[in-house]
Amino acid sequence: MSSPAPALSLKQVLICGALIVTLSMGIRHGFGLWLQPITQEQGWTRQTFSLAIAIQNLSWGVMGVFAGMLADRLGAFRVLLIGTVLYALGLAGMALSPTPLTFALTAGVLIGAAQAGTTYAVIYGVIGRQIPAERRSWAMGVTAAAGSFGQFLMVPIEGQLITRLGWHTALMALAAVVLLIVPMAFGLREPRATGTAAGGARRDQTIVQAVIEAFKYPSFGLLMAGYFVCGFQVVFIGVHMPSYLKDKGLSPEVASYALALIGLFNVFGTYAAGTLGQRLAKRKILAVIYFGRAIAISIFLIVPLSPLSVYVFASVMGLLWLSTIPPTNALVAQIFGVAHLSMLSGFVFLGHQVGSFLGVWLGGFLYDRTGSYDVVWYIAIALGVFAALINLPVRESAIARPVPQPA
């Protein structure tokens, strides 16, 4: 009888996972820089662009569930390869789309599906299966910090590419760059033992049983609702803040630097959230993050707008930006185990992406109707308070399952 294949090393998982998330999330965070160049040249409204990005977020959420199922069953490697190819095709299609419909299909559906296969749900599944529970939250924080560094690194690069090459060629260049995920994916090929899930995780439930159990458990619904708010806030700000600042008379460089600062400070915020998740109640960490966002947005709208106020706001929001990801995903693993972690994380992330859809679309819709983003800012504040309150009742202990009786 052959011995099981050795698990992946902590260093290997963190390096390969972090580099993949750096690229996939870094490129994604810069899409707001394309709003004005594309709409102005194509003669489209902001709502047209916003709808495509909203569809992207919804596609990402829906396809994330299925990508998670495949990753749990077959391993992350194959899912990452498929996602990378779709990402390159979507970016190229985004550059070449002549109509709003084709733009929505490429920038929306295709890139959304690509992100489902190259971002957190798939990578966190590997972390959950390959890294011991006592270091899991910290490892998730490291990976989320890498995604934040990707924003800090890639957003200014994307801005320079647009300035120097034009937006068409810049997108084609990114389509080539994203293919670098392929060699990194080889570092996440998981060992698999006979009769188990990817990475050797024992399956005591079918997929249907795991889904029913999760949706009957109130804390799972609360985590999804909190993640809905996270998606609404960060995608609205990420996509619409460049245009908001330009409307207020600030230069495009201010927006580019602001998005980069969000990425830079989120490196520290996500790492801190992951590290604190090993010591403190994760539900309380989430409540503080969401309430902190509501306070930060409120102060940003009250004080006089200037480059300095924008940079301070971006830095504070950066600390809170993706710091919800490590405690939320660590809670899913802590409550339900790791055999179906990618799939269940995908369902929670679907809530995030429904919020993202509404945040980005509502921003464009209400701007076109009112000529202002004010209403959406107020909604983001109210939702932050709501998310802080609903995370407090989450139960963090492992779910109690009946012990199988011997035949």
Image (tube, rainbow, N blue to C red):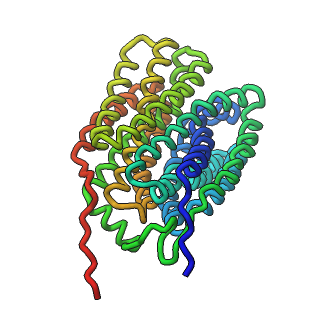
Q: Residue 21, image x and y in percent?
A: 57, 45
In the picture, the quarter occupied by the C terminus is bottom left
* Count of numbered badges drawn on the protein: 0
**Placement of 2 over or under 330, stated as above or below:** below
Q: Residue 66, image x and y in percent?
A: 50, 63
Q: Measuring 57% from the left and 42% from the top, which residue is drawn there?
A: 25
The reply to whether residue 243 is visible in this rendering is: no
Q: Residue 68, image x and y in percent?
A: 49, 61
The reply to whether residue 407 is visible in this rendering is: yes
Q: Residue 105, image x and y in percent?
A: 62, 52
- Relative side of 198 to 291, left or right: right
**Placement of 26 over or under 295, stated as above or below:** below
**Placement of 242 over or under 56, stated as above or below:** above
Q: Measuring 37% from the left and 41% from the top, which residue is drawn there?
A: 229
In the picture, the quarter occupied by the N terminus is bottom right
Q: Nearer the viewer, residue 266 or 268?
A: 268
Q: Nearer the viewer, residue 210 or 375?
A: 210
Q: Quadrant of residue 191?
A: bottom right
Q: Measuring 59% from the left and 24% from the top, which residue is drawn there?
A: 256
Q: Quadrant of residue 167?
A: top right
Residue farthest bottom in this picture: 407
Q: Nearer the viewer, residue 395 or 294?
A: 395
**Placement of 222 over or under 286, stated as above or below:** below
